[in-house]
Image (cartoon, rainbow, N blue to C red):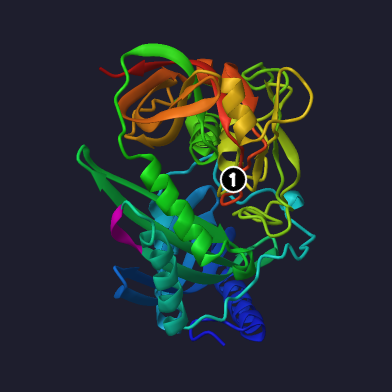
Amino acid sequence: MSEVAISQDASQRELDRLSELAEEVIRRARAAGASQAEVSASIDTGLNVNVRLGEVETVEHTRDRGFGLTVYFGQRKGSASTADLNADSIQATLEQACAIARYTEEDPASGLADASRMATQFPDLDLWHPWAIDTAGAIALGQDIEDAGRAHTGITNSEGASVQTGESVSVYANSHGFVGRERGTRHSLSLSLIAGDEAGMQRDYWYDSVRSAKDFMSAKALGNKTAERTLARVGARRLSTRQCPVMFSPDIARGLIGHLIGAVSGGALYRRASFLVDHAGKQVMPSWLNIVERPYLMGGQGSGAFDAEGVATRDSALIENGVLARYILGSYSARKLGLESTGNAGGIHNLVVEPGHGDGGKADDFHSMLNRLGTGLLVTEVMGQGVNTITGDYSRGAAGFWVENGQIAYPVEEITIAANLRDMLAGIQAVGADVDKRSHLLTGSILLGRMTIAGE
């Protein structure tokens, strides 16, 4: 058994202990005068090993505890937290939360989510897969990954390989009588390499992230892919300033969908700090495009039966035939907007961007997407924070490849890509079937009709 792993029985005992603690603290909060109370408690366990040039750089074992309490005295709210689960710390956290609540201003939107919205079904979503690897095994695996990458001619250096395994058990409970228990595992492997020529050095990386270690790509495959990506960047050029079609690789396309999520999330909307304020029910993307939240995907990176407030999650369209079907709301932001929670307190649960294009027919794989791009820019890296969610203005440093007649011609770097997110979303021409499954945002490559490239 792993020296960091919580066994299945041990994880259930931890959940029992956290559940009992949460319910007891809620009872004590009510006895102290709170009209409502909620508790989040968690225990996270992990191992992180980094190796570089065959030598161990770091070995980190973690066992973190978290306990957060929020109390409501009417519509006055107080929150406090601790990283210590002993009785004295919990009592001090309770007293601090109550003291804060007594002195805060009333907020008409505060309070627990509606009791009628609490989850009642808790299916096993296949999220718990402890990895029986010890420190020596993790070091050896990291060395194998790095060795596979460094074996490629042209690779001149390494920034190291990382092996991580983590397990989490958590409980959310509130004074509606709701107690939600979750446990999950996340494991990752990564490698970063350097290649050089007379024109300079190039760096790239790759990683794999899974719920179950049996789903990892092999050490050799990860090393090979990282080396191939790094070597492909050697000899990168700048482009002259132009306008052209742009295709985002799947891992970069995720960021574009992330900007959409930010623009339709409650906090930005009730502050009126989004370019998509008042856009529910309006066309914001092409009519063939659908984006659906799927909280119950087996083994999904974002799967869960309830949100951070205990509200039941459900399959639900976000974009339906290009129309913004709803916003992304917890109960607080919903009340501020005069709407209802969408079960998204704490974020999205598996957002699936359905592959397709305006021509109908079979969705494109990566090579077919390049053919559809024709001549234009493939973006594989973006840099900087040049995205304004209020106006939708988008301007970021980028690197990738110039594509001619559907074939990669040469690598490019030191350019800026710019447009407005409103136009980018409306101008999507295709979403590929080459879905990147390493995230809770599940999308393939995304092809945009036109962006401005600023270069030489």
Quarter location, residue 144? bottom left
Q: Name the residue under label 1.
A: 436
Judge whether 398 appears above or below 189 on screen: above
- Residue lying at 38% horizontally and 56% vertically, measured from the top left: 152
> In the shown orientation, is residue 245 left or right of residue 155?
right
Highlighted range, magenta: 155-160
Instruction: Establish if 34 lies above or below 249.
Output: below
- Outermost residue toward the front in this view: 153
Residue type at mark 1: give it.
Asp
Q: Can residue 219 be seen in this view?
A: yes
Tell me the residue at 70%/65% (across/down): 177
- In the shown orientation, is residue 276 left or right of residue 57? right
Where residue 440 sits in the image (x, y, percent)?
60, 48
Residue 110: give x, y in percent of width and height. 54, 45
Query: Relative to the observer, which residue lies in front, 279 or 134?
Result: 134
Question: Residue 213 placed where, x, y %?
Answer: 59, 69
